[in-house]
Amino acid sequence: MTKESITTIDQYYVYTSHNLGGGLGENFYHLPYGLKQVAIIVYSQLSTFPPWAGLEKTTSFNQAIIVAIGALNSAFWSFIFLFLIFSLSYKHSRKYLPVKSKVFLLIVLLFFWLNTSNMNVRRIMCIYPLLFIVYAQLRSIMQKRKIKLMAQWSILAYVLLITSYLLAKYY
């Protein structure tokens, strides 16, 4: 069973390698093992990046509306993910997080790691409720001042990522 799993993962990796679109995500698949998985996981949680990426290809108003909804979804989920990253960097937040939530995080990380051979939203969306539960629990145990600070950091980080992308692309 383990050999079959490894073979399947290798097949997904080959499939993904042949079907990379030449965008930013393709560069992550050329990184060394370990760093590659971390980069793919982080990028998958920030995708669609940049949020307006699909607008260039729309041919009708209805398509533009659908892409705009996707862009809002991307910005919202990026905020949640960055909030989790910043919040979990504080010992206080990790200390008071319930054991069940810590198990959820472990399951999420393992699931993400195992899906890096062909990471896409369709494959990983089943794990989003667990991440949202952890996000909600973190917000409930944190002080309002810390929540506001983590929210500001998350928004700032997202704006800096978009700015970096634009600078790298156009300069």
Image: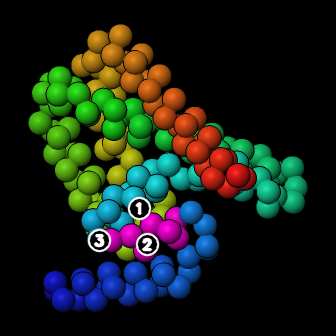
Look at 50% across and 49% down and name the residue there: 46
Query: Looking at the image, how many numbered discs can be counted on the residues?
Result: 3
The foreground one among 126 and 5 is: 5
| Disc 3/disc 1 C-alpha distance (Å) | 11 Å
Tell me if 28 is positioned left or right of 61 in this view: left
- Nearer the observer: mark 3 or 1; the answer is 3
Report the Cα–Cα distance between label 1 and label 2. Answer: 8 Å
Q: Which residue is mark 3?
A: 33
Q: Amino acid at mark 1?
A: Ile
- Disc 2 crowd rating (10 Å Cα; few below 14, some 14-19, many 20+) is many
Of 162 and 18, nearer the camera is 162
Residue 118 visible here: no
> Of helix, strand and loop, which one carries label 2?
loop
Residue 132 drawn above or below residue 4: above
Residue 148 placed where, x, y %? 42, 16
Q: Secondary structure at mark 1?
A: helix
- Mark 1–mark 2 CB contact (< 8 Å): yes
Numbered range of the magenta stretch:
25-32
Counting from the top left corner in percent of width and height, residue 80 is at: 43, 36
Q: Amino acid at mark 2?
A: Tyr
Q: Which residue is mark 1?
A: 40
